[in-house]
Structure formats: structure tokens, C-alpha cells
């Protein structure tokens, strides 16, 4: 993968770009996004969880015709710069994304919003607590 991308405040994306990206965001790209989220969670556990930050980050990611990430920018901040930067770091450390193909079979660049939620697991109730009903 290319050099790590730097998160920056995203420009408001055009609705048409997001809509076309969402339509093409299917099985293989979802698996890729889960790998990115998993990597982000690993970094979170190693570097950030001790700071007590939690939140949801939405990153605008542009994926080139060859699957490489061309740009990563924070679309909606978690409120913690450490978490925001972590998502783009995880993307930079992940394998290339699947190539997006149009209806004619031609590779095309696509912009997608990747959402990652960071939650401290110590705050979750123990398994089974409160889940049983009488």
C-alpha cells in the first residue's frame, strides 16, 4: 500500500457520488470494510483505549480503479482526534479494496463512507445480564 494517508476535514461530498458508491458497495467491499474496522479496533486496543475515548468516526474514502485508496478524510468526527486519525491509519495498513466495476464490467473510481464505532468493552453488561425475561 502507498504511504499512509492523513485524515483531514472532508469537503461535503456530492450526493450523487455517495449514492452511486452505496449502490456498488456489496459483498467483497463489505468484507474489506470489516477488515479495516478490525484493524482499527486492534490499534484502538493497543494505543487509545487507555485514554478512555469512545465514539463513531465516518471516513470518506476514495478507491481508485485498481483498488488502492486514493484519499481518506474524516467525514464526521468522533470528537476525539486520536480516534479520527486511527481510522485512516487502519485503512492505510489494510490490503487494497476490491475493484468497483460498473454494469459494463469497467473498473471505476468510487467514493464511500466507512463508519467505525469505538466502544470500550468494559462498559458492556456481562453476557446474559438483562437478556432473560420471565
Image: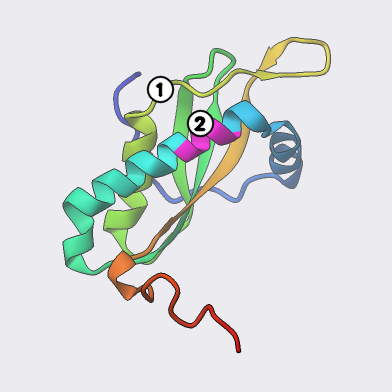
Asked if the residues shown at circle 2 and circle 1 are in contact, with their CB atoms under 8 angstroms apart, the answer is yes
Is residue 50 rendered to the left or right of residue 94? left
Vertical placement of 66 versus 115: above or below? Answer: above
Vertical placement of 52 versus 85: above or below? Answer: below
Residue at (18%, 49%) from the top-left corner?
46
Residue at (51%, 37%) from the top-left corner?
33
Is residue 36 on the magenta stretch?
no
Residue segment shown in magenta: 30-34
Is residue 5 rendered to the left or right of residue 28? left
For the rendered model, the colour scheme is rainbow
The residue where tag 1 is placed is 95
- Quadrant hosting residue 50: bottom left
* Number of residues whose C-alpha sits closer than 10 Å to that of mark 1, classed few (under 14), some (14–19) or many (20 or more): some
* Number of residues whose C-alpha sits closer than 10 Å to that of mark 2, classed few (under 14), some (14–19) or many (20 or more): some
Is any part of residue 71 visible from this angle?
yes
Is residue 2 rendered to the left or right of residue 72? left
- Residue 32: give its label: 2
Instruction: Count how many numbered circles sit on residues in the image.
Output: 2
Vertical placement of 110 versus 16: above or below? Answer: above
- Residue 3: give its label: none
Q: x, y (%) of residue 23?
A: 76, 36
Amino acid at each position: 500500500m502507498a504511504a499512509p494517508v492523513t485524515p483531514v476535514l472532508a469537503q461535503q461530498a456530492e450526493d450523487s457520488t455517495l449514492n452511486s458508491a452505496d449502490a456498488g458497495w456489496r459483498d467483497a467491499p463489505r468484507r474489506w470494510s470489516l477488515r479495516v474496522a478490525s484493524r482499527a479496533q486492534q490499534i484502538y486496543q493497543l494505543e487509545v483505549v487507555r485514554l478512555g475515548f469512545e465514539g463513531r468516526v465516518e471516513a470518506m474514502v476514495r478507491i481508485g480503479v485498481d483498488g488502492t485508496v486514493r484519499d481518506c478524510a474524516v467525514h464526521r468526527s468522533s470528537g476525539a482526534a486520536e480516534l479520527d486519525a486511527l481510522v485512516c491509519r487502519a485503512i492505510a495498513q489494510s490490503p487494497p479494496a476490491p475493484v468497483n466495476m460498473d454494469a459494463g464490467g469497467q473498473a471505476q473510481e468510487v467514493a464511500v463512507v466507512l463508519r467505525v464505532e469505538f466502544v470500550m468493552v468494559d462498559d458492556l453488561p456481562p453476557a446474559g445480564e438483562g437478556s432473560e425475561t420471565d
